[in-house]
Image (cartoon, grey):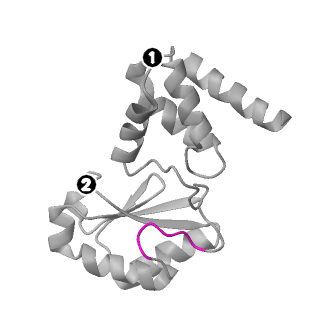
């Protein structure tokens, strides 16, 4: 129970740092997700933030479900996002998605058994010039080939990245 209280103190601290302002909801939720340990936003935190910002819980959920970077279910350490926007689609995003599905043994929305990767499809993240592209954590990879994709995924699996 003390651990839960300590986490809620951290939630309060983050809210205070952003001035308990509705304008900073996305930044607050990103920070909370980063400290959650599950790469997601626990329901009790969402409720707490909604109350602190005098917002309906449904409004907070509408924001976090709109953006693919947020999760409300525990996810892997690394979120693997495959862009599904027009330029990536035309440049082979479907093939990239199939290769990742085969490599990780996942479908979009699933997490590897070891908790390392969660695969999602997302809207444009601004890498049209290097399409088809994926994003792992905050790092974007483009001009992908099957070999390059295998190297990238393996480097994360082997712990050569810090998130």
Per the image, the residue denoted by label 2 is: 124
Give the residue at the far right of this rendering: 2
Per the image, the residue denoted by label 1 is: 21
Distance from the alpha carbon under mark 2 to that under mark 1: 27 Å
Q: Quadrant of the N terminus?
A: top right
- The structure residue drawn at horizontal position 55% and vertical position 77%, both measured from the top left corner, is 154
Q: Position of residue 142 (x, y in %)?
A: 31, 66
Magenta-drawn segment: 107-112
Q: Position of residue 132 (x, y in %)?
A: 26, 69
Asked if the magenta segment contains residue 111, the reply would be: yes
Q: What is the chief secondary structure element of the magenta stretch?
A: loop
Q: Earlier in the sequence, mark 2 or mark 1?
A: 1
Residue 63: image quadrant is top left
Answer with left or right where residue 85 lies relative to residue 24. Answer: left
Name the one closer to the observer, 161 or 84: 84
- The structure residue drawn at horizontal position 64% and vertical position 22%, both measured from the top left corner, is 12
Answer with left or right where residue 25 lies relative to residue 98. Answer: right
Name the one closer to the observer, 71 or 90: 71
- Local packing at callout 1 (Cα closer than 10 Å; few below 14, some 14-19, many 20+) is some
Q: Position of residue 134 (x, y in %)?
A: 36, 64
Q: Quadrant of the C terminus?
A: bottom right
- Local packing at callout 2 (Cα closer than 10 Å; few below 14, some 14-19, many 20+) is some
Instruction: Tally the numbered discs.
Output: 2
Q: Position of residue 146 (x, y in %)?
A: 37, 84
Q: Callout 1: helix, strand or loop?
A: loop
- The structure residue drawn at horizontal position 57% and vertical position 41%, both measured from the top left corner, is 43
Answer with left or right where residue 88 lies relative to residue 66. Answer: left
- The structure residue drawn at horizontal position 41% and vertical position 77%, both measured from the top left corner, is 149
Residue 145: image quadrant is bottom left
């Amino acid at each position: 129970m003390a651990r839960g209280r300590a986490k809620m103190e951290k939630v309060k601290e983050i809210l205070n740092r952003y001035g308990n302002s509705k304008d900073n909801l996305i930044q607050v939720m990103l920070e909370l997700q980063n400290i959650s340990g599950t790469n997601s936003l626990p329901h009790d935190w969402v409720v707490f933030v909604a109350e602190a910002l005098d917002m309906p819980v449904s409004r907070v959920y509408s924001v976090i479900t709109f953006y693919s970077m947020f999760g409300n279910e525990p996810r892997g350490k690394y979120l693997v996002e495959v862009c599904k926007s027009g330029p990536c689609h035309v440049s082979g995003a479907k093939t990239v998605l199939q290769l990742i599905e085969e490599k990780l043994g996942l479908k979009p929305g699933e997490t590897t058994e070891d908790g390392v990767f969660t695969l999602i499809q997302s809207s444009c993240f601004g890498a049209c010039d290097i399409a088809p592209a994926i994003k792992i954590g905050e790092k974007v990879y483009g001009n992908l080939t099957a070999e390059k994709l295998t190297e990238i995924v393996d480097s994360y699996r082997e712990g050569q990245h810090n998130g």
